[in-house]
Image (cartoon, rainbow, N blue to C red):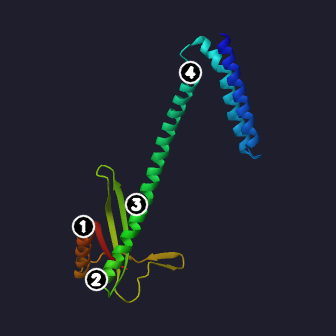
């Protein structure tokens, strides 16, 4: 019993010495109060540990605190990983769409230099197959001349002109076939319209 009391006193003195050294080294800012709180918890744990051992001989505060910290970190880590994964997937999709649009515009300009193109793409992530799926590609074609007016405001009435007339001509089919082969997607996801 005397040996246990001696070890307990040595542990308390060591903890107080450690806590005092840490408090001296800490800078005077807002984190100091949080550090003092944690150090106080450590000191309370050192005081309580022998009292708890009287009731439960197999009790070890270090084992319990390690288990609690691991469980807390595991839950926190899983949540952070899930958030990181969602954010990463979202930004990857946005970059993919932007690159797809730029690439399509460049390829179309190289293949058919007589027109200007505006490409809008939509894609999603297929988690079952772990790949990005192109859902929709809308290609606006401007064949020289003046761009169509989209909305005219006269007095209080607003008149709209449909600027997305689907192209049914031969060039539209050529563009669909070309993009379908280049991107390895179905012609059904590609829509061509006049600008």
Image location of residue 101, percent across then percent down: 37, 71
Residue 120 appears in the rendering: no
Residue identifier under label 1: 184
Mark 3–mark 2 Cα distance, whole angstroms, equals 26 Å
Q: Say left or right for 183 vs 50.
A: left
Mark 3 packing: few (<14 Cα in 10 Å), some, or many (20+)? Answer: some
Q: Which of 97 and 34 is in front in this view?
A: 34
Q: Residue at left 22%, top 74%? A: 177
Q: Residue at left 69%, top 21%? A: 47
**SS for callout 1:** loop
Closer to the chain start, of discs 1 and 2, is: 2
User: Does residue 167 lie above or below 76 as drawn?
Assistant: below
Closer to the chain start, of discs 4 and 1, is: 4
Residue identifier under label 2: 111
Q: Say left or right for 3 vs 128.
A: right
Mark 4–mark 1 Cα distance, whole angstroms, equals 62 Å
Closer to the chain start, of discs 2 and 4, is: 4
**Which labelled disc corresponds to residue 93?**
3
Residue identifier under label 4: 60
Mark 2 packing: few (<14 Cα in 10 Å), some, or many (20+)? Answer: few
Mark 1 packing: few (<14 Cα in 10 Å), some, or many (20+)? Answer: few
Position of the C terminus by quadrant: bottom left
User: Can you tell which quarter of the image residue 194 is in?
Assistant: bottom left
Closer to the chain start, of discs 1 and 3, is: 3
Q: Say left or right for 161 vs 25.
A: left
Q: Contact, CB < 8 Å: mark 1 with mark 2?
A: no
Closer to the chain start, of discs 3 and 4, is: 4
Mark 1–mark 3 Cα distance, whole angstroms, equals 18 Å
* Foreground label between 4 and 1: 4
């Amino acid at each position: 019993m005397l040996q246990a009391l001696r070890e307990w006193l040595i542990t308390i003195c060591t903890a107080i010495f450690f806590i005092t050294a840490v408090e001296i080294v800490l800078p005077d800012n807002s984190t100091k109060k949080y550090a003092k709180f944690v150090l106080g918890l450590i000191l309370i744990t050192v005081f309580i540990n022998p009292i708890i051992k009287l009731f439960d001989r197999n009790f070890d505060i270090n084992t319990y605190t390690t288990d609690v910290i691991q469980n807390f970190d595991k839950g926190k880590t899983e949540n952070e990983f899930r958030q990181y994964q969602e954010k990463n997937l979202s930004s990857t999709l946005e970059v993919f769409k932007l690159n797809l649009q730029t690439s399509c515009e460049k390829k179309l300009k190289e293949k058919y230099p007589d027109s200007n193109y505006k490409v809008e793409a939509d894609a999603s992530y297929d988690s079952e197959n772990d790949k990005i799926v192109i859902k929709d590609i809308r290609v606006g074609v401007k064949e020289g001349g003046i761009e169509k007016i989209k909305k005219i405001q006269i007095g209080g009435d607003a008149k709209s002109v449909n600027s997305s007339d689907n192209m049914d001509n031969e060039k539209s089919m050529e563009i669909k076939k070309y993009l379908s082969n280049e991107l390895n997607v179905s012609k059904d996801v590609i829509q061509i319209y006049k600008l």
